[in-house]
Image: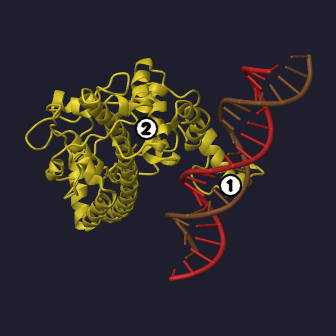
Chain colours: A yellow, B brown, C red
Amino acid sequence: MRHGHGSWRALPAKAGLQRCGKSCRLRWTNYLRPDIKRGKFSLQEEQTIIQLHALLGNRWSAIATHLPKRTDNEIKNYWNTHLKKRLSKLGIDPVTHKPKSDALSSVDGQTKADSNLSHMAQWESARLEAEARLVRESKLRSTSMNNQLALSGSGVDLGQQLNKATSTSTQPHCLEVMKAWQGVWSKPTKCGLIAGEGGSSGLDLESPTSTLCFSDNSMPVSTVGFSDNPMSSLDLITNSGTFEGTPVKEECDEEYKVYEKMNHMGEYKSMVNSVALNTGFHDMGFSTVESPWAPESSKVGNEHIPVTNFIEGFTNLLLGNSDDRNSLDNSSGDSSDNGDADATGCEEYEENKNYWNNILNLVNSSPSDSPTF
DNA sequence: AAAAACGTCAACCGCCTTCTG
DNA sequence: CCAGAAGGCGGTTGACGTTTT
């Protein structure tokens, strides 16, 4: 790619290839690109794929944005050839991510949980749409900013200015809705005080900070932890009182002002509220959103109705965790017959919370160079 | 040893969206 | 505003390697 990104159509002619430009682009993005990681998927990557697939479905490009150095095609193939089969073997529907036996289950907590997951998917879809819109607006804003910079004629290097503007505009903005929801999770419950007090639940809803970081071996390691060492963001909050990650609060505040100025928050809010109303998301203890950035958003939902744990530990099970295998057997097999369900209620709640926290943090972790966000 | 079955994955296809003139 | 080009995405195919019979 000596000529960099540009016309793929012109590439075959220049390279003397008998392929169409589209084919060349595909070959490049899926195979030749230097920043592609090849080889076996790590446990974390597998878990990430499973969790994100549960939330996003077959949106491989969106999933790929959370797995650096992996292409959507590779993830798609891996899902179809490995994970899908493993799920099926375990009696879990790879499409719905719920135990197949539940397909016949009647009106119980399990069904409610299924619908809740469906609601979550709808939320995510709505969120992605809103996010895409915000990014578009942000790009427009940065473009106009660039024009201003060009006109200003200051001594500062224009490239740097552009980079600055671009990096600001491409910060993952959104997920505020999800974070609001996360804030709901972090409210005190019958299981005890989980998060900080003082009405804000300790979760800095104003910060879109990613909590996902990547170690040297490029394995995604969420700061909230994965199955090996589960530690929810709430734990972090409890322990440190702050949300780990790069502080970008100022940027977010600034952007919020811009969006508010552009009158998009109203649109966003109404959409969010509409989705909440239409999907019955209130059932999950999440009421309509006043403002995702506002502290009030953490006050929504006075009650917790823990999501029934139909996917409890299945990702761990898939990854060969024998301990979790038992938990899945309980949940997927005859969970309704489980006599000590009440006794483990808090446990289940915690695991659900951790599960969704994982997903939330994965989603929150949209790479700044993500093509989707 | 040979054939069949199976697994893997790069590549292709068609549809859709975005860009550009 | 419109039409064509280009790019993006998800589903599917087919070649090739490996395992099983």
Residue A184 seen in render: yes
Residue neighbourhood size for the residue with mark 2, other residues' Cα within 10 Å, grouped as few (<14), some (14–19), many (≥20): many
Spot occupied by residue A242 in the image (x, y as percentages of width and height): 18, 35
Numbered disc 1: secondary structure:
helix
Q: Looking at the image, which residue is at 17% across and 30% down?
A: A238
Q: Looking at the image, which residue is at 15% across and 40% down?
A: A201
Q: Looking at the image, which residue is at 29% across and 66% down?
A: A267
Dot 2 corresponds to which residue?
A: A51
Gap in angstroms between the C-alphas marked 2 and 1: 34 Å
Marks 2, 1 in one chain: yes
Spot occupied by residue A212 in the image (x, y as percentages of width and height): 35, 35
Vertical relation: C7 (above or below) A325: below
Left or right relative to A323: residue A93: right
Kind of residue at disc 2: Gln
- The N terminus of chain A appears in which quarter of the rendering? top right
- Residue A195: assigned label: none
Left or right relative to A24: residue A306: left
Closer to the chain start, of discs 2 and 1, is: 1
Vertical relation: A271 (above or below) A332: below
Spot occupied by residue A100 in the image (x, y as percentages of width and height): 50, 39
The part of the image, by quadrant, that contains residue A114 is: top left
